[in-house]
Amino acid sequence: MEVARLAGVSQSAVSRAFTPGASVSDATQQKVRAAAKALGYQPNAIARSLITQRTNIVGLVMGDFANPFYTEVLAALSVELQLRERQVLLFAVPPGRGVDELLPFVLQYQVDAIVIAATTLSSAMGWECHRRGTPVILFNRMVPDTPTHVVTTDNFAGGMQVAQMLAEAGHKRFGYIAGHADTSTSIDRERGFFSGLRSHGITTIQRHDGRYSYRGAFEAGIAMLSARRRPEAVFCANDMMAMGFLDAARQLGIAVPDELSVVGFDDIPQAAWDAYSLTTMRQPIDQMVASTVELVTKPADGARNDRATFTFLPQLVARRSARLL
Amino acid sequence: MEVARLAGVSQSAVSRAFTPGASVSDATQQKVRAAAKALGYQPNAIARSLITQRTNIVGLVMGDFANPFYTEVLAALSVELQLRERQVLLFAVPPGRGVDELLPFVLQYQVDAIVIAATTLSSAMGWECHRRGTPVILFNRMVPDTPTHVVTTDNFAGGMQVAQMLAEAGHKRFGYIAGHADTSTSIDRERGFFSGLRSHGITTIQRHDGRYSYRGAFEAGIAMLSARRRPEAVFCANDMMAMGFLDAARQLGIAVPDELSVVGFDDIPQAAWDAYSLTTMRQPIDQMVASTVELVTKPADGARNDRATFTFLPQLVARRSARLL
DNA sequence: CTGAAAGCGCTTACAG
DNA sequence: CTGAAAGCGCTTACAG
């Protein structure tokens, strides 16, 4: 091409000059660099990937951009991947559509791996990716019987810990605000919470659906807290909902944490805001992202070890929204 | 390739079968589709783009993922672009690093266009993109003397409108919480605000830097509101900061809006939350995104009309944080 | 260390 | 409508 001619070398030479560790003499290296600079030349990553069979692109599928937890994951993942010379091809699941409709597009772009966060995929699609040799990493999701990697927080353990702390602090009446019924996060947190309470002899728990949204939880809160025997300790399946719930309590003039304890999950930045000062279970984003990056960047092993699972324990962040021991 | 052999046709035929509007007989079409399905074949978009010289990828560079306004833009832009069969290659500017270091990577991937949001680029880099024929769209940014498209809100007009409303409502002492000094958004909003106040004969305005963050504005709020003659109407350069400022007022026991009016900018979802009920200037995200999409998807015109500017007027969203007429 | 040649998986004139 | 051939911009054995 152009650069080769200007530098007076072969095309192979310029290729080698841009390949770290390739065998080129210093002289050639210099000539090529000079010519490249003069022409403003940069290797074409697309053409390169065609021959190397690696695009260095990872497909990232996201469903919920409204939850700061996931946008934080998105930011951290992008930065870490770039640091390792991987690019992120982003796919936003349109409202009302499924991930499965999107996957064919991401596969067309020959991504080296797919990370799915804030949404889930079907088992069939998981197998399709497996057949094509494209690793899939599920972030905070589980799809049974599907050959994917999983990076997740131990949601069950988190819910259980919340139950124990709240019960040990002497609360008597409990409530739970659920997220979407079809997400493993909400289901597992609920199971853990209920199970923890059960071990303290508590089996009656008020429960409302908050749809993983501020507004849904606000409405659930008004309903739950206006009832005759309202709960005095409530666990919300994520922070966004805990904030909606706290605002409902505020509107009803219920003092937090004196008359009501509220605990969330995630520890999004807003949880630390003064208006809420939310006690919550922190998901270790940095570690989760690091594991995801590791899974994405590790060379495809002949061993076909395609079901690695990384599970992290959430950590209590005690602020002022709950009365604990 | 595989599919061609199985279908018993030429490679050209399978290419045509996957090209809308190409001249193929129904019979061939059928055969190819069948073979493709049997083999799980999907055209390789990377190989295709090498020959067509269009990747259908747009590079999206984002700096600030902590501001919900920009993640909303990100989500909307991704969805709209996908609907038009464009993919988004996402670049997050690492903290402390500049956009310029990132651009070479995005150019290597031969993106059809670059959208820059929540951060800015140097004029030199703008010219480099121009030289390579890659259109650049600045979202809510301005870089003087650079050949880029611009999609922006009229920040000056917005600031001015806030000033007028606040002055007409009878407020006497004013404050401004600035964002980053090197962003055109903060500068223009400030200029508009000050200019609007000046036309009402007000020239003394208290001013603090909130660094476009909740915490920065919270601290600025404590300082500004603890002073002897504290302002009674404060304009914050964005909503995140207005929330920090409101929490500062709350902590100091200052009644809003009776003793203090606060106005933000953006209308992020959290502005509607009960704890804040923030009066703010709404940026018309949908229209801004639509214009961006138009710029990205319109065919490169021979006219080289490469400095289109779309400017939108922000719109008042009156809630309960400010006393207005 | 270096170059000529083949090939990655497509599309697109060009003939037929 | 259809196929053979060339070519997009690279990398990588293979000889030298």
Image (cartoon, coloured by chain):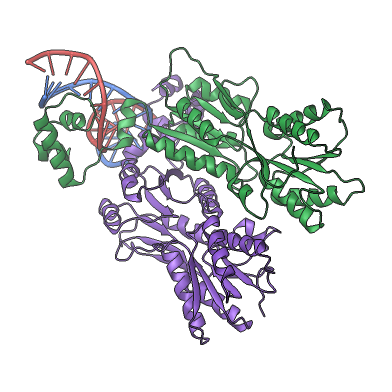
Chain colours: A purple, B green, C red, D blue
Look at the image and tell me whether residue B220 can be seen.
yes
**For this view, does B64 lie left or right of residue A139?**
right
Using the image, determine if residue B168 lies above or below residue B66: above
Foreground residue among B126 and D9 = B126
Q: Quadrant of residue A294?
A: bottom left
The image shows residue C2 at horizontal and vertical percentages of 39, 30
Residue closest to the eye, B227 or A250: A250
Quadrant of the rendered image containing residue B5: top left
Rendered-image quadrant of the N terminus of chain A: top left
Residue located at (91% from left, 45% from top): B229
Q: Residue A121 at what x, y percent from top left?
A: 34, 55
Viewer-closest of A16 and A116: A116
Residue B179 placement, left or right of B310? right
Kindly tell me whether residue A25 is visible in this rendering: no
Outermost residue, bottom side: A201
Q: Residue at x 44, y 44 (%)?
A: A90
Question: Residue at 11% of width from left, 27% of height from top?
Answer: B25
Q: Which part of the image, by quadrant, shows the C terminus of chain A?
A: bottom right
Up the image or down, B66 lies above or below A166; here it is above
Q: Position of residue A154 (x, y in %)?
A: 48, 70
Q: Is residue A322 left or right of residue A22?
A: right
Residue A309 percent across, percent down from the top left:
41, 66
Numbered marks: total: 0
Q: Which residue lies at the image location 71% right of the left edge and 39% below the top edge?
A: B237
Which residue is the extreme one toward the right? B228
